Amino acid sequence: MFGKNKILVLTLGTVLVFVIYFLSKNAVLQKSVDDLATDNQNLVDDGGLEEASHPLSIETLRQGNYPGSDISIEQTLTPGSNFKRYIASYKSEGLKIYALLTVPNGTPPAEGWPGIIFNHGYISPAVYKTTEKYIAYQNAFAQAGYITFKSDYRGHGNSEGEAQGGYGSNVYTIDVLNALSSIKKFQDVDASRIGMWGHSMGGSITLKSMVVSKDIKAGVIWAGVVGSYQDLVERWRRGISPNPSIASTSTRGRWRRELIARYGEPSQNPEFWNSISANSFLADISGPLQLHHGTNDASVPIEFSKKLETQMEAAGKEVEFFTYQGDDHNLSTNLTLALNRSVDFFDKYLKNSN
């Protein structure tokens, strides 16, 4: 009887030791999980990435590497009045991206020519060509003595990669940041005097680039999609205005739906929506802005530019804003005036800043 009791006691003791061991291991495991969740601020309850590491976030753009490459001349084009024109190429994330390059005639200044990165607005990637659209715009800066560089963006024309749109992805901004690094390496460019011009979607790219890179000394934006992402969601839906900046009816607004489904409406989760909006980072903008917008713009609300002007002033940053009464998305009626103002602005900050 005693032998059986002894065996029972030993058995219960073994079970008790096992239970204590299991509970202690489970506690250690739980503590490790808790510590991981505390120490790694990129984790959220659902196992996804926190807002700051979302591919659209400004912080993610800032953490990226944009080495660009040497610029290759692919084709020599008919020259302009006082400048040479080329189809060129550079690398962005391993992709070959084509661009339109202009170089002033004559001997460059000792420090090199000032440069302007030229960001075009939405043109359907299926019909886009490097040498079509925006030629008169780009020529105005070329004639004024600037090296200019207009990236096609990936998936446009002969450029490699997939065209992903300008708002649900930052890949076009990545292409432009790599274009910036590439033009800085180009012969006869003064890397300390680089400006950026953008129209419509290209205005959004310009604003993002200027809160990411300190190498852009001044920016000019025409009819820019420069509202915050909250504004794009709440004030720029299909049906409010014709919107040429989203590729097709089948994909129009898809990025909105996907982001809202995961992160909620802007009013529900302002932290996330602010994290992907360049407007939230204007304290870090790299230089002054000049804004242009027509009052009859049927594609992009003029309120976006008005609000950006107010936000720049609130951040203590230099900004100019020109409105054009009755003019359209392309400032067709006031094209010469707007170009002259833009050239004068770049002259002030890129040519006369030293």
Image: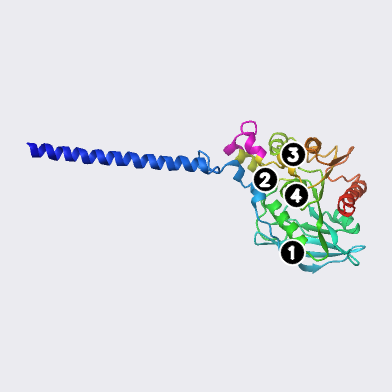
Dot 1, how many residues are within 10 Å of its Cα: few (below 14), some (14-19), or many (20+)?
many
Q: CA distance from mark 4 to mark 2?
A: 21 Å
Kindly identify which numbered label has been placed on residue 49.
Answer: none
Q: Earlier in the sequence, mark 4 or mark 1?
A: 1
- Residue 317 visible, this orientation: yes
| Image point (84%, 66%), residue name | 77
Checking the image for residue 122, the label placed there is 4
Residue where numbered disc 1 is placed? 89
The answer to whether 187 is drawn above or below residue 210 in the figure is: below
Q: Nearer the viewer, mark 1 or mark 2?
A: 2
Instruction: Give the residues in magenta.
Output: 260-274
Classify mark 1: helix, strand or loop.
Answer: strand
Q: How many marks?
A: 4
Query: What's the CA distance linking mark 1 and mark 3?
Result: 31 Å
Q: Are marks 4 and 2 in contact (CB under 8 Å)?
A: no
Rendered residue at 74%/64% (across/down): 89
Spatial separation of the CA atoms under disc 4 and disc 1: 20 Å
Pair 2/3: label in front: 2
Separation (CA) of disc 1 from disc 2: 26 Å
The three-letter code of the residue at mark 3 reads: Gly
Q: Could you tell me residue 167's position as x and y percent?
A: 69, 45
Mark 3, residue position: 227
Amino acid tagged 1: Ser
**Residue receiving disc 2:** 58
Q: Earlier in the sequence, mark 1 or mark 2?
A: 2
- For image coordinates 22% across by 41% down, the residue present is 14
Q: Earlier in the sequence, mark 1 or mark 3?
A: 1
